[in-house]
Amino acid sequence: NEALRLQLEVTRYGQDEALVIVRDITRLHNLEQMRRDFVANVSHELRTPLTVIAGYLETLQGSDMAPPAWQRPLAQMEEQAVRMTTLVNDLLLLARLETSERSGGDIPVDVNELMERVAREARSFSGGRHQIEVQCEGHSSIRGDASELHSAFANLVLNAVKYSPADGEIRLRWWQDSRGGHFSVEDQGIGIDPIHIPRLTERFYRVDPGRSRDSGGTGLGLAIVKHVLLRHSGEMSVKSIPAQGSTFILHFPASKVDTKIENNYGEVA
Ligand code: ADP
């Protein structure tokens, strides 16, 4: 009784002839669905035990119950429990994003507010070691899901912090033109060799796994960005020069972007 999934491939030969190949991909589709459900279920089941472990480790630290010699291992255990929680949350978010190509919400999300929020979060993550600047043109909003868009913007900005030396400058920009709205994050960090760029949005693909882990990366950030964009009809482009820096740009089509024009008095029309 289940729906049949067919894939059609049409090749035209001149005016009157065409070769049509019909593939039954129902089994493949179902297997993919099972994989996604499995990942989502495992991640969900891991959340509660992890919260309990991290909670007790935090309580034990600095308390009289644990001798001084235990403090360092306890701190390391808590750090790892927090890392695992981040990984599980990212896996869960990705599984949810993969289930459909339609965004979870459909409201106007204020770009200015979103950029200020991710800049604030990035400054706190960087501990004031990076200079983070925001340049937002006009008053725009993107139609979609606020929390998904926040994940996409935040992942790019946190990556800029993770892969840049201290006191590096990070610039967040938003502008719009006839094609739509564009959000870019430019850093003066380690850059990326062009051979890696096509694979960056694959799950767990990292240019330097050691560096990614040390900076708290899960290897899922750009996969999350890709799926959020798919659900908002957006696209991503990357420009990067090794040892000089990278620019990640998110492009949103005009149909998803609403821009209010400011009059001469700075009021929004
Ligand atoms: P991670 O959690 O490892 O940062 P991502 O999916 O966010 O995972 O990114 C994938 C890989 O792309 C990273 O491991 C890193 O090698 C590379 N990368 C992402 N953003 C940048 C950046 N701004 N500068 C240099 N490398 C980057």
Image: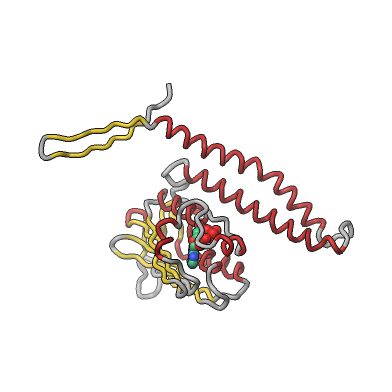
Residue found farthest to the top: 1
**In this image, 77 relative to 251: left or right?**
right
Residue 247 visible? The answer is yes
- Measured as percent of width and height from the top left, residue 81 is found at 70, 53
Foreground residue, 146 or 72?
72
Q: Is residue 91 left or right of residue 59?
A: left
Q: Position of residue 191 (x, y in %)?
A: 46, 69
Query: Residue at left 52%, top 56%?
Result: 221
The residue at the point 59 percent across, 38 percent down is: 41
Q: Nearer the viewer, residue 130 or 194?
A: 194
Q: How is the image coloured?
A: secondary structure
Residue at figure coordinates x 52%, y 44% from the top left:
95
Q: Which quadrant holds residue 9?
A: top left
Q: Quadrant of the N terminus?
A: top left
- Furthest-bottom residue in this view: 167
**Residue 216, x across and y down, in percent:** 61, 61
Q: At which x and y percent is residue 131? A: 54, 76
Residue 183 visible? The answer is no
Which residue lies at the image location 69% right of the left edge and 44% below the top edge? 48
Q: In this view, which residue lies farthest toward the left?
A: 15
Q: Is residue 254 above or below residue 13?
A: below
The answer to which of 31 and 101 lies nearer the viewer is 31
Give the mark count.
0
Q: Quadrant location of the C terminus?
A: bottom left
